[in-house]
Image (cartoon, helix red, strand yellow):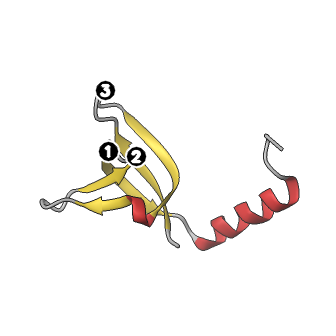
């Protein structure tokens, strides 16, 4: 499944926030062609940029976490 690094605008404060490895299913276009990020069921964030994460980077993350685990383990 494709994943994206997304730069979006917080609806309340209008600050820019970056989300890493967002699934493609969480991005959608409204009737005006604008892209939005579905943060949860209640809030949709306006997207400034959505950059596809290369498959090589996703594979490297899997190898790293398989070898070293996560901080919480």
Q: Nearer the viewer, residue 50 or 70?
A: 70
Kindly report which numbered mark, 1 or 2, lies closer to the viewer in this rendering: 2
Q: Is residue 3 left or right of residue 36?
A: right
Q: Nearer the viewer, residue 23 or 9?
A: 23
Residue 45 is labelled as 1
> Residue 38: x and y, percent?
36, 51
Give above or below for 70 relative to 10: below
Q: Is residue 58 left or right of residue 8?
A: right
In primary-sequence order, the first of circles 1 and 2 is 2
> Residue 67: x and y, percent?
87, 59
Q: Distance of mark 1 from mark 2, alpha carbons?
A: 10 Å
Residue occupied by mark 3: 13
- Mark 1: give few (<14), some (14-19) or many (20+) Cα within 10 Å: many
Residue 7 is labelled as none
Residue occupied by mark 2: 40
Residue at 43% in and 65% down: 24
Callout 2: SS: loop
Residue at 30% in and 61% down: 28
Callout 3: SS: loop
Callout 1: SS: strand
Query: Are the two marked residues, 1 and 3, in contact with CB atoms closer than 8 angstroms?
Result: no
- Mark 2: give few (<14), some (14-19) or many (20+) Cα within 10 Å: few
Q: Nearer the viewer, residue 59 or 36?
A: 36
- Mark 3: give few (<14), some (14-19) or many (20+) Cα within 10 Å: few
Q: Distance of mark 1 from mark 3, alpha carbons?
A: 11 Å
> Which quarter of the image is occupied by the C terminus?
top right
In primary-sequence order, the first of circles 1 and 3 is 3
Residue at 19% in and 59% down: 30
Query: Are the two marked residues, 1 and 2, in contact with CB atoms closer than 8 angstroms?
Result: no
> Residue 4: x and y, percent?
47, 60
Give above or below for 52 relative to 12: below
């Amino acid at each position: 499944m494709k994943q994206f690094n997304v730069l979006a605008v917080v609806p309340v404060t209008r600050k820019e926030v970056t989300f890493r490895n967002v699934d493609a299913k969480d991005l959608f276009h409204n009737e005006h062609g604008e892209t939005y990020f579905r943060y949860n069921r209640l809030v949709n964030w306006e997207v400034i940029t959505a950059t596809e994460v290369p498959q090589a980077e996703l594979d490297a993350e899997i190898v790293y976490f398989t070898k070293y685990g996560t901080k919480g383990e």
